[in-house]
Amino acid sequence: MLRNLFGRLTGKGPSRGAALFGAVVAEARKPHWYLDGEVADSIDGRFAVLATVTALTIVALESGSPAGDAASAALTERFIEAMDAEHRQLGLNDPGLGRRVRKLVGSLERRVDDWRPAAGDELDWPATALSSVYRGEAPRDAALAHSVEALRGLWRRLAAAAEPQRIEGQF
């Protein structure tokens, strides 16, 4: 259904944005988030990292060009599809599934809004990381510092990559 609604924005075919989403997922699965960053290795912890990495990537794609906007929409579509599929695999295929997925997408939207100031170098990285990755539950100082530096490094890679490379998930 979502493909039908957003097909014009992202181009033809369900694979649009797949490479980009694959790169985002690969980043979110790196062990350092859970070991050095001490993010809980749980469904909630993994979601927090995935949503944070996705949000930073969306902010980097918001360059104003039609290609960046289309890639941002495609990435959001892949995120929605993944959340829907994951919940179905968990056996949560009930009438409340749509509401839960909308809540997760809202959480992504909040993170995008929180990370937007990064584009203008006006971001309080530790406070934003605490809210986005740890949902306000303070980890040890070293763990937060690790996650902040990892997010800054990701942001630098995203900012340094040319738009075509970002769109293809090469950052």
Image (tube, rainbow, N blue to C red):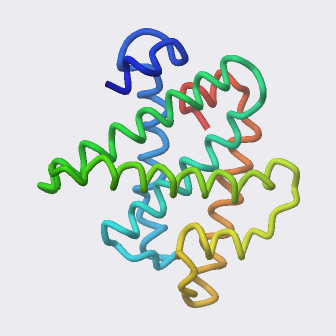
Query: Tag count in the figure?
Result: 0
Q: Is residue 77 above or below residue 152?
A: above
Q: Is residue 50 left or right of residue 155?
A: left
* x and y, in percent, of residue 52 in the image: 55, 57
- Residue projecting furthest to the left: 91
Q: Residue at x 63, y 26 (%)?
A: 165
Closer to us: 171 or 14: 14
Q: Quadrant of residue 77?
A: top left
Q: Is residue 41 left or right of residue 145?
A: left
- Residue projecting furthest to the bottom: 140
Q: Is residue 109 above or below residue 164?
A: below
Q: Is residue 59 left or right of residue 168?
A: right
Q: Residue at x 35, y 50 (%)?
A: 101
Q: Residue at x 61, y 73 (%)?
A: 131
Q: Residue at x 33, y 42 (%)?
A: 82
Q: Quadrant of residue 43?
A: bottom left
Closer to us: 165 or 81: 81
* x and y, in percent, of residue 143 in the image: 57, 81
* x and y, in percent, of residue 169 in the image: 54, 32
- Residue projecting furthest to the top: 12
* x and y, in percent, of residue 14 in the image: 35, 19
Q: Is residue 155 above or below residue 1?
A: below
Q: Is residue 107 left or right of residue 42?
A: right
Q: Quadrant of residue 44?
A: bottom left
Q: Looking at the figure, which quarter contains the N terminus?
A: top left
